Image: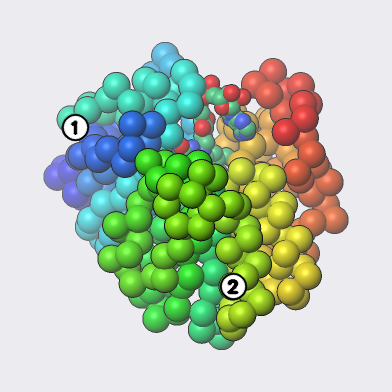
Amino acid sequence: MKKSDAFVKKDDLAFLEIAGVENENPKVKTFYFEASLNAEPGQFVMLWIPRVDAKPFGVMSQTGKARGGFAVTVANVGAFTKKMFALKKGNRVGIQGPFGKPFEIPKRAKRVALVAGGFGAAPLAFLAQRLRAKRVGVVFIEGARTKANVILEKRLRSLGVDFRVATDDGSAGFKGYCTLLLEEALKKEKIDAVFACGPERMMQAAVKICQTHKVNVQFSLERFMKCGYGVCGQCACGSKLVCSDGPVFETRDLPELVDFGKTRRDASGAVMPL
Ligand SMILES: Cc1cc2nc3c(=O)[nH]c(=O)nc-3n(C[C@H](O)[C@H](O)[C@H](O)COP(=O)(O)OP(=O)(O)OC[C@H]3O[C@@H](n4cnc5c(N)ncnc54)[C@H](O)[C@@H]3O)c2cc1C
Ligand code: FES
């Protein structure tokens, strides 16, 4: 079977060669795979490195369905991602997916805002790709600590999005929180819907701003996952399971997401503050 004929599925583990690796910055890399994955923006795959762990990663891009490839963008933060960073073109990883509930593109949306913090820019880049293919105008607001931490800018600009950046130290774009750029956009521009992915406190602020401006917001939650299948309960946020009810939620789900912006579970399952 040719590599490009491989299909990644939810119920089967595919063991795929890494087709390419791109450095986004010293802490973030994009891994490319030459296999078909029938994912929607916001869905994730479980990557498995034998004798290390299996962890969830949002799909960053996808080309074609019958042939073509997909990519995930990984931030080096701990044991699994450190091992992932040591892998090179030609090395193999186990992949299963896609999992989870994707972002929903409102039928009549003409112009939307995407707000990203950190690696949250990755799943939103896939959403931007899909939105631009449907000729929806996209304001892409990315927040990062410094200019060096901004990721995927070139890729996003090439999609024709209105790219705006906010950094904590002002080394690129607006100095301050990316949520302030969102607030400004909602005050001055016609924005039909908002999509957010990033640190939970940032998404909490984005949700509040959207509620004030009466704009629907979809946001992608991150929780420590073990099974990815809705079995172990590790990823619970209130009465919802992030792996199977999410990871994408929206304003109407808030009454059930009682832990949103407050607590999460660590690897042992213990509840801890965010
Ligand atoms: C749906 C979903 C999509 C994701 N998409 C991406 C992606 O596109 N790119 C990407 O780089 N990562 C993504 N992640 C996060 C990724 O799965 C974790 O960063 C990864 O599990 C870290 O594993 P590790 O062993 O390297 O680090 P660990 O050793 O598990 O953790 C390293 C540090 O991060 C903290 N941490 C780990 N998980 C969480 C958490 N859920 N909430 C808060 N703090 C946490 C730990 O407390 C520790 O301080 C996603 C997670 C989910 C749930
Ligand atoms: S990760 Fe096991 S239920 Fe969600």
Secondary structure type for disc 2 = helix
**Furthest residue to the top?**
51
Q: Position of residue 176 (x, y in %)?
A: 58, 52
Q: Residues within 10 Å of mark 1 (few under 14, many from 20)?
A: few
The kind of residue on which mark 2 rests is Ala
Residue 167 versus residue 143: which sits nearer the camera? 167
- Picture quadrant where residue 17 is located: top left
Asked whether residue 97 is in view, the answer is no
Looking at the rendering, in which quadrant would you find the C terminus?
top right
Rendered view: 28 above or below 69: above
Quadrant where the N terminus sits is top left
Residue 185: give x, y in percent of width and height: 59, 73
Q: Which mark is residue 22?
A: none
Question: Which residue is located at x 29 percent, y 21 percent?
Answer: 86
Q: Can you identify the residue that label 1 sits on?
A: 89
- Which three-letter amino acid code belongs to the residue tagged 1? Lys
In the displayed structure, does residue 148 sit left or right of residue 235? left
Residue drawn at the location 56% of the way across and 85% of the way down: 108
- Left or right placement of residue 174 versus residue 89 in this view: right
Which one is nearer the viewer's eye here, 235 or 210? 210
Pick the front one: 50 or 81: 81
Residue picked out by circle 2: 185
Provide residue 213's location: percent of width, then percent of height: 74, 74
70 versus 269 height, above or below? below
Q: Dot 2, crowdedness within 10 Å: few (<14), some or many (≥20)?
A: some
- Number of marks in picture: 2
